[in-house]
Amino acid sequence: MKNFTSVHDVPQIDALVKKALAYKADRFKDKTLGAGKRIGLLFLNPSMRTRLSTQIAAQNLGMEPIVFNVGQEGWALEFEDEAIMSGSTVEHVKDAAPIMGNYFDILAIRTFPSLKNREDDYSELYIKQFIKYAGIPVVSLESATLHPLQSLTDIITITECLNNTTPPGRGEAGGKRPKIVLTWAPHVKPLPQCVANSFSQWVNAWGKADFVITHPEDYELDEQFTKGATITHNQDEALKDADFVYVKNWSTFKDYGKIYNNDPEWMLTNKKLATTNNAKVMHCLPVRRNVELSDEILDGPNSIVTQEASNRVWAAQAVLSEILASQK
Ligand SMILES: NCCC[C@H](NC(=O)CCC(=O)O)C(=O)O
Ligand SMILES: NC(=O)OP(=O)(O)O
């Protein structure tokens, strides 16, 4: 693996999941793989889980992580080629990225979308410019349209739950495919589509589940990610018999970055959960309690959000391990 920016960088999802679970069982099994190597973690936007789990993952492999909060502490970066830099940007990525390419062996970047211009955001200019100019492997820590480390974690967590179901449930052992539902939830702010896009892309590529996406009208996601899923505006219908419910807000894609709906009826409650197959409830976090997800769900027995967030370490470790192995 050279870069890790989407599911397309992964030749075999299940092999990567297996690798991550092996690190969960023995975190120091490859503790010298990254000895003498450095990873730069660049944050243009806030983060808790991604920032901490990726540092821990790198250290478990013997690498030295260095965090740089570019968004707050760095020079304002310009990403457009041929820009006349007479405005607020101070340094071009063309100048900054090769320097980082000399300082580090791997570069990881978090860069949210602007949610102002769909074409710009969906061109993934920022991460592509880093790939073009850094000359070292680039890992997405959530980009303008995708969050692949989160989605890998989500598949790891689902796999773990299916493996731990006794008697055999809907995993491979049980024969029946699990039903995974991605449901939109209300929020007070327009949020990126990244997590929903990426989760859809990975579940579709994984191909081992019946995948249903439910959201209000006008919240359709980009088809390039959702193609293959069943899409419905009827949340009650979608939730029936679900084994996993993935909750996430996103802003509109077509009329880009807007809030068209804030109906609290879309928030998952125990009453709604009762129609599922005792579904596990997932969310990438951070979550706005009692707006996006109710206390009763988050504090109840079906929530696996803490397990999910904890698994971020093993996802990051598996990805860094693959990149280090291909540098040998
Ligand atoms: N990294 C995980 C989610 C990040 C981001 N959430 C947020 O910005 C939440 C902000 C707030 O709740 O104000 C998102 O949805 O893509
Ligand atoms: N889920 C996730 O990426 O969390 P952070 O934004 O805190 O990194």
Image (cartoon, grey):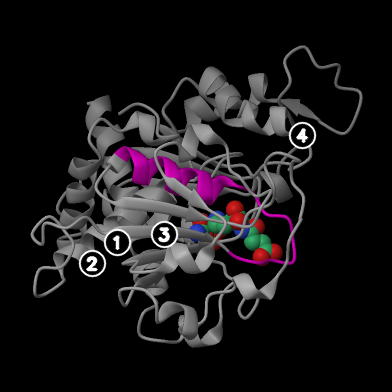
Classify 264 as above or below 234.
below
User: On the rendering, which quadrant does ligand 1 occupy?
Assistant: bottom right
**Residue 157 marker:** 1
Q: Earlier in the sequence, mark 4 or mark 1?
A: 4
Whether 188 is among the magenta residues is: yes
Whether 99 is among the magenta residues is: no
Q: Is mark 3 within 8 Å of ligand 1?
A: no
Few, some or many C-alpha atoms within 10 Å of disc 1 (few <14, some 14-19, many ≥20)?
many
Residue pointed to by mark 4: 117
Distance from Cα at disc 2 to Cα at disc 1 = 6 Å
Q: Earlier in the sequence, mark 3 or mark 2?
A: 2
**Residues shaded magenta:** 185-205
Q: Residue at x 31, y 52 (%)?
A: 210
Classify 252 as above or below 294.
above
Q: Earlier in the sequence, mark 3 or mark 1?
A: 1
Q: Position of residue 312 (x, y in %)?
A: 37, 58
Q: In the current view of this chain or complex, which residue is farthest to the top?
A: 82
**Residue 161 marker:** 2
Q: Horizontally, is 26 left or right of 3 in the view? A: left
**What amino acid type should be assigned to the residue bearing mark 2?**
Cys
Q: Earlier in the sequence, mark 4 or mark 2?
A: 4
Considering depth in this image, is 290 or 325 the residue closer to the camera? 290
